[in-house]
Image (spheres, rainbow, N blue to C red):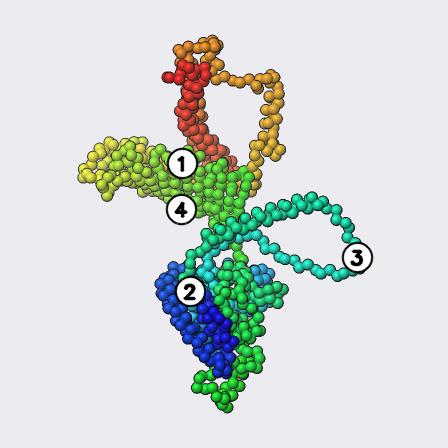
Amino acid sequence: MEGLLPETALGRLSGAFSQGDAQASGGGRMEVLEEKEEEEQREEEELKASDISDNLQDLEMNVSMEQVCVSSDVLPGSDFDWSSVDMSQLPSSYKTNSPKEKKLLQIADHFLQQYTHLCPDRKPLFLYPVNECGVEKFVSTTVRPTLLPYPELYHWDGCASFVSDYLTMEHLKSPITPPSSLYSPTTILKYQRGNCFDFSVLLCSMLIGAGYDAYCVHGYATREICTLDETLELCPLLRKPQEVPQQGMKKKSNKYRVKSPPDLQSKFELQQEAKKKAETEAAHKNEAREEKVVMEVGKPEHDPLYGLRVHAWVLVLSGKREVPEPFFINPFTGNSHSTVDEHFLGIESVWNHRNYWVNMQDCRNGCKDLIFDLGDAIRWEIMLSESNKPLQLLPDAEEEKELSDRDADDMEKEEKDMSFDMPPSWVASVEISPRGTEVVEVKEWFKNREDMLDIREVNKQTQLTTEYFSPGHLLGLKAHTYMSLEPETERTIEFYNEVRVDGLQKLVENANEMTEYFVGRDDFLHVRHMEFGKRGKKIHLAGTRTDINARPIMQIKECFHRNLEKPADEDVAERIFLITEEMIHLTHHLKDKYITASKKDFFKVAEGDRKGNEMVMTPEMCITYQAGSSEKDKKLLHLYKLLQELTEEEKQLKQQVRQCEAEVLNILKIRENEEAAVKLSVSIYNTERNEKRRRQYEAMKNTVEDELPGQEEQDLDYLAPFLIQIGHREKITKWQALRIRDDCLADLKHRLINKANIIQARFEKAVEELQKKDQWFQENQNRLSALEEDDFLARYSESTFHIHILALRLKREKQMAAQKYLTLQEKLHKDPRLAEHLSHT
């Protein structure tokens, strides 16, 4: 088949695609062969083509059985059940065929019979697949030209981007055969998914409606195009913009034109520019060479289905909408491609809403040599002829005589068939509602805010807002998720637990519950869960808030990590305070090789049953279960003391719960104020904008100027106070060196301890003052106005923050004390005045 192709239609179709069909396919012109001299050549071509096609079919069967069917099961987007499509509301045109459509199907079937007879080695044409209702529809009638009322969809790139972004890609069930069904663009838009044929029909409908000369293409492409594999493609952000060549306008000669001025450019500068240009071109060549090497290394692996993978895309011809030359559009990506792109390996047929064309050209070199002049009857076989020439069948070997009258009647009938006008599309009007333009999520980025807010995400569907903060917020906020800033609504607050004394990492709240999560606590607490009941009647007092009565606490549950310093049956894992039921449940950690844990249940005595202020303990007030022992190994006195401790801790927990509620209210109030008056932070180094820092700098500058001249140049000697005690000597003894070392280290230790004690005292004093404030607030809360309560919460928050800072400073001093001591010790050993005597100690 490497010789010249025969000039007959059958020779063109079968010969041109006998080998090229493995890579792509084309079409053939259906003409009657009357010359007997060409019959022998034709028969030989048919025999060779049949042998090759048999081998090709064997290859397809082997590959498809091993790879095609398996790969389709794991492809993305294949889990949608198209049988669940609701067909009850579809128009009648979807479910039945009009008389004109039935006539068209007869013509298409007649055309397919001729095509199959003349081109037995070609793949079947994609003519009349079934729609979503199971009704056969001609592919041209599935195209529904539509102009949508959106400016973004008036151009081809906008339409292509919409289709590729809005729809979810589904792979063909078999990559080497076209689909058996073709759904309407309305259904594809409704369910937002489809295969390459669905994508192409929808895109072609939009492009034709926008005034483009567009066509759907049934052909073959590479694996990367068919499977939307862009791993080897260059990042879109790195692509250089294409340079559009500008066609120069021809200047008309004019004998009266003004003479051009003399060229005053320096020849040396021109030589230097030419030299630079040559160097630049050489560098570009090297880059191109390196890119070529990289491309060679990154080439995809061999595809066993190369040339057999079926794909559908869109062809846009020149002429309309100022399109300069034909180009392809891959509907999966929305990108345009040249018609000579090596990723497109061949074309079987093209169609639009008016007609259907079969490719008759050789596709052995892909689409590089194809000419897209659909009016050329030699290169493209049209189904509904626009001329009076009939489409003739090849006569059989036994029917080579003159046509009878009956044949003439058939030819006249075929002429009428070929002049048949395409019926209107059966697809309903394609509409895209503005719902696709509704905002789903809003994400905002912030910088240089004083409240340290970095990002805010708002889900417009759930109305859920999430705010993220950088370290440094006044309250140690890390993230805040909420629907409303109103108190006692659903929210999640995350903290930077490093800056909190209590190690609180996250707080989750709603109207009835509140849960705290802790990290790194000395008491091993990691979860505290509180349940609230419904409020009673609201108290109405003049000058006070109407919602000052707090939610009644129903239950407090705490969970602890394992403390390895205690036995498992004495280490509490969970304790539950049932406030309303006057009960306390304790559950201990599991001992090794045990499946049940030790438990204790306490029943508190009512206030009326107590003797004075003392609590009476009876054996019935405590039920214990000791894992691994049937006897009660704890005496009643021990249980009595434990109940007293738990009762006291319950009171403290109630107070902590109220503090937690107050802290949440304070956070909401502060966040509301921060959003109402957003303030920007200014760097301390920006003295022009930071007025406070500028005043400090000027004051420091004035102080330095008032000092004695040369004082700033004096260096402080850290050994000076100790050297004075022994007198300044050029050479000191070993005993003196050891004394200086010990005195210096003792002085540092003394200063570190004093500093830690000062911070500890300040911390304890701040905690004591905060407790007094909280007690005062609990006693006077009902008499406070809303303004007074807000003012108290603001001051309470400042005190809490101050305590956090003191705790951090104390912790840091304790951690750094040993390091400072070792650093000074090493410095003393290296000091040239002491090194001689301390190097060996």
Q: Amino acid at mark 3?
A: Arg
Disc 4 element: loop
Whether tag 4 and tag 3 are in contact, CB under 8 A, the answer is no
Q: Amino acid at mark 4?
A: Asn
Disc 3 element: loop
Residue 150: tell me if it is visible.
no
Q: Residue at x 65, y 58 (%)?
A: 246
**Disc 3 target residue:** 257
**Disc 2 target residue:** 175
Q: Amino acid at mark 2?
A: Pro
How many marks are shown on the rendered structure?
4
Question: Which mark is drawn over residue 503?
Answer: 1
Q: CA distance from mark 3 to mark 1?
A: 88 Å
**Disc 4 target residue:** 512
Q: Quadrant of residue 149?
A: bottom right
Q: Earlier in the sequence, mark 2 or mark 4?
A: 2
Question: Which mark is drawn over residue 62?
Answer: none
Looking at the image, which is closer to me, 576 or 195?
195
Q: CA distance from mark 2 to mark 3?
A: 66 Å
Answer few, some or many: residues within 10 Å of disc 2's Cα (few below 14, many 20 plus, some between 14 and 19).
many
Q: Residue at x 55, y 39 (%)?
A: 448
Q: Position of residue 642 (x, y in %)?
A: 28, 33
Q: Is residue 224 above or below residue 718?
A: below
